[in-house]
Amino acid sequence: MKQKIFNLSRRYQEALGSFLKAGPHASAESARGWGTRALSVGLQTLDLAKLQEPVLVRQILPDCLPGKRAALVRRAGVFFAAAIIPLEDTYRSARQATAPLKTSLETL
């Protein structure tokens, strides 16, 4: 399992780096698949957030002109937001499914 998480982490970071290097017209649609993959190995939203930082701080931002950094960080946010959609949908569904149980427990 650890190997699966390591491989997914590495590939996610590579995909993010490629997305950022592709420029402002790159499609973030492929990022949604990363959220689904993250779920399959047990990663959560915070785990994906932790994968974003090293790509930005070590690989992308050092070579970026200061005037373009804000735009680059925004684009990384777009990728991240697209990637966590499947994660957030899963948690929302789980909360909705357990709401009647919570109500019953409170009544008891």
Image (spheres, grey):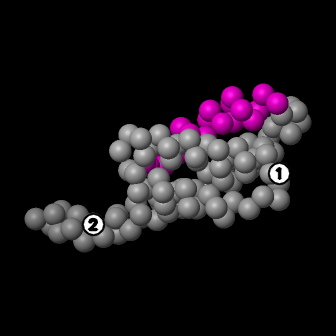
Give the residue displayed 71% in from the left and 32% down from the top: 59
Magenta stretch: give its range. 43-63
Label 2: which residue?
Answer: 98
The amino acid on which the numbered mark 2 sits, given as a three-letter code, is: Thr
Q: Residue placed at 72% from the left, 48% from the top? A: 18
Magenta-drawn stretch, dominant element (helix, strand or loop): helix
> Of label 1 and label 2, which has the lower sequence position?
1
Q: Is residue 94 left or right of residue 100?
A: right
Position of 28 relative to 72 (above/below): below
**In this view, which residue lies farthest toward the left?**
108
Q: Where in the figure is residue 73, as x and y percent of width and height?
A: 73, 42
Tell whether 67 sits left or right of 75: right
Depth check, front residue: 47 or 13: 13
Label 1 neighbourhood size at 10 Å, few (<14), some (14-19), many (20+)?
Answer: few
Q: Is residue 17 above or below residue 59?
A: below
Determine whether the residue tagged by mark 1 lies in a helix, strand or loop. Answer: loop
Residue at (66, 53) in percent of width and height? 79
Residue bearing the label numbered 1: 23
Q: Is residue 70 on the magenta stretch?
A: no
Q: Callout 1, which amino acid? A: Gly
Query: What is the C-alpha distance between the residues marked 1 and 2?
Result: 42 Å
What is the number of callouts on the image? Answer: 2
* x 48%, y 57%: residue: 37
- Residue 104 position, x and y percent, is 17, 69
Q: Dot 2 lies on which element?
A: helix
